[in-house]
C-alpha cells in the first residue's frame, strides 16, 4: 500500500467497524424515529452512508451495484424517501460495498491518486487523493451523527471496540 494512503486506510477500516457498531442492537422502529421535522433519523443517515460508501468505491474505480438504490432513487432529503431499509438490510449493504473498497486501497497507485478528481469537492486540491480525504471526512461526520442519535434513542454509546469480524 502507498505510504500516502496508510492513515486513510486506517480511518476507512475504523469507519467500517464504527458504522456497524452504531447499528448494534437498534430495532427498526428506533431507527425510524425522528426527534424533529428538522432532523434525520438513523435509518436515513445510515442509508445515505451506504450509498456514499458505494459512491466512494466508484470514485476509486470499482464497478459495483448500489445496494440501497431502490430506497434513495435520487432523494436528497428524508421527505423524498418512500421507505427506508431495515437494520439488517443496511448492515448487508455496508458489508457488500466495504470489502471491495478496502481491497481497492491496496491497488491504488501514485498515478491514480494524482489524477484529477471527476467530482468538484469543496477543496483547493482537485485530485483523487484529496477527494479520498473528503469522502473519509464525510463518513466520519455522519458516523458521529449516528452515534449521537443512538444515545438520544436511549441506547448505549457507540463502541470503539473492534468487532469479532471487521465487517459483519
Image (cartoon, grey):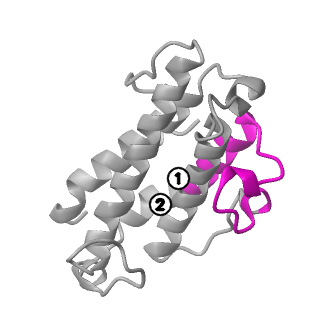
Segment tinted magenta in the rendering: 70-98
Q: Residue at x 59, y 29 (%)?
A: 23
- Answer above or below: position of 31 versus 5: above
Residue placed under numbered mark 2 in the picture: 101
Q: Residue at x 37, y 80 (%)?
A: 120
Residue occupying the far left of the picture: 3
Q: Kindly check if marks 1 and 2 are in contact, taking CB atoms under 8 A apart as contact.
A: yes
117 displayed left or right of 2: right
User: Residues under labels 1 and 2: Cα distance?
Assistant: 5 Å
Q: Residue at x 69, y 67 (%)?
A: 65
Q: x, y percentage for residue 141?
A: 39, 45
Q: Is residue 124 magenta?
A: no
* Residue 54, quarter of the rendered image: bottom right
Q: x, y percentage for residue 116?
A: 31, 87
- Answer above or below: position of 153 versus 28: above
From where the camera sits, is residue 12 visible? yes
- Answer above or below: position of 162 versus 75: above
Q: x, y percentage for residue 42?
A: 62, 35
Q: Residue at x 80, y 61 (%)?
A: 70
Amino acid at each position: 500500500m502507498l505510504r500516502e494512503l496508510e492513515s486513510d486506510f486506517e480511518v476507512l477500516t475504523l469507519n467500517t467497524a464504527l458504522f456497524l457498531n452504531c447499528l448494534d442492537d437498534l430495532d427498526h422502529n428506533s431507527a425510524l424515529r425522528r426527534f424533529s421535522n428538522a432532523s434525520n433519523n438513523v435509518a436515513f443517515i445510515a442509508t445515505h452512508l451506504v450509498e456514499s460508501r458505494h459512491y466512494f468505491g466508484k470514485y476509486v474505480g470499482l464497478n459495483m451495484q448500489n445496494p440501497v438504490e431502490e430506497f434513495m432513487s435520487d432523494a436528497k432529503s428524508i421527505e423524498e424517501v418512500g421507505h427506508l431499509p431495515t437494520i439488517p438490510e443496511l448492515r448487508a449493504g455496508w458489508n457488500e460495498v466495504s470489502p471491495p473498497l478496502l481491497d481497492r486501497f491496496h491497488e491504488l497507485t501514485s498515478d491514480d491518486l494524482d489524477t484529477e478528481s471527476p467530482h468538484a469537492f469543496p477543496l483547493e486540491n482537485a485530485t483523487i487523493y484529496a477527494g479520498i480525504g473528503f469522502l473519509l471526512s464525510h463518513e466520519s461526520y455522519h458516523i458521529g451523527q449516528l452515534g449521537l442519535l443512538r444515545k438520544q434513542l436511549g441506547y448505549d454509546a457507540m463502541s470503539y471496540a473492534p468487532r469479532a469480524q471487521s465487517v459483519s
